[in-house]
Amino acid sequence: MAWRKYCWSKRSASGDESLSVRGLLGIQDLPRTEIEAILERAKFFQTPQQRGTALTGRMIVNLFFEASTRTRVSFEIAARRLGADAISITASGSSVSKGESLVDTLATLAAMRPDAIVMRHAASGAPHFLARHLDIPIINAGDGTHEHPTQALLDARTILDHRPTLEGLRVAIIGDLAHSRVARSNIHLLSKFGASIVLCGPPTLLPKEMAQLAPGVTLTHDIREAIAGADVVMMLRVQLERQHEAPIAHSEYFGFFGLRAEHIPLAKNDVLVMHPGPINRGHEIASEVADSKQSVILNQVENGIAVRMAVLERVTVLERGTVGGAA
Ligand code: NCD
């Protein structure tokens, strides 16, 4: 099989796969020092006119098997700002829709020698599987209900634009925790930096086991308790496309778990209201809160480009050992 030519056997000594050889698969095994380096570099890329040449002449393939606006577009912009050619392929426009297997699609793309593949897939673990077979850095842009590492990194960048440190912050993550890869990546990241994390949602969307995901995590079903004294409130979309249970009626959900203006005074005065998007106004968050001065939702989108520039640079240039300094 042709794809075997591109198999790799390199693995880091510790065996962790996150940014082990190359690529970025998740936050769980990513060392704190790596996270700090990416966040620092992202700060450098925050000025919109900031460009780089690190990826000049390189090709980044964005392979999206699930819908995406923010993530796909910001990876494209990030690649172009670093001088790369960026090509986006969606499942419906690829041979996957003609029955080709995932490995064969990826092997075909790998044969075209891209410098990195950014991948979103509905199956948890899909990018990890490919990273074991292909000698090309794979960046996980969201795998099923598992991880969404660049979202957690851009969320951390956004918080750090307003707070000196993540240590000791009280972060409430509210909504459909069970199906949220954004929550899982954020929990791992925030816990590594000593934040205390309160997860809040209806019992059907908040499995008890989530308390064991990382140190510093507690659970509640009471939104007021979750928000009390919070530095950051992260809202999550109810991910109906992943739910197999009977959905909770919109009005009932909003009544119990929707973030409304009356909740804001319970939090710290300078609370940050976050949401990875897409937002459903009037379902998990009231319009007036999404558009309030506490909301940093659009800052998150903006930081997505800077963080993805830092990640693309790091995973493609890492082996040459030249990351850092003016690009
Ligand atoms: C999230 C995702 O796809 O996991 N969105 C995003 O990447 N900005 C969250 C969601 O879809 O609700």
Image: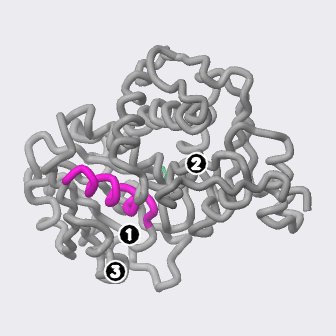
Q: Which residue is mark 1?
A: 176
Front residue of 281 and 92: 92
Q: Quadrant of residue 29?
A: bottom left
Task: Tell me residue 138's x, y (percent).
Answer: 63, 49
Task: Give the number of the disc on residue 21.
Answer: 2
Mark whose residue sits in front, 1 or 2: 2
Residue name at image x 90 percent, y 56 percent: 2
Instruction: Rate crowding at label 3 as few (under 14), some (14 to 19) or many (20 or more) other CA atoms within 10 Å.
Output: few
The answer for how far apart the CA atoms under marks 3 and 2 are is 33 Å
Rendered residue at 86%/52% (across/down) = 108
Density class for disc 1 (Cα within 10 Å; few <14, some 14-19, many ≥20) is many
Residue at left 70%, top 46%?
A: 136
Type of the residue with mark 2 = Val
User: In front: 157, or 70?
Assistant: 157
Residue drawn at the location 37% of the way across and 61% of the way down: 183
Spatial distance from mark 1 to mark 3, Cα to Cα? 10 Å
Answer with left or right where residue 108 lies relative to residue 284: right
Instruction: Give residue 228's position: percent from left, percent from top.
Output: 9, 59
Magenta range: 180-194
Secondary structure beneath disc 2? loop
Does residue 284 belong to the magenta stretch? no
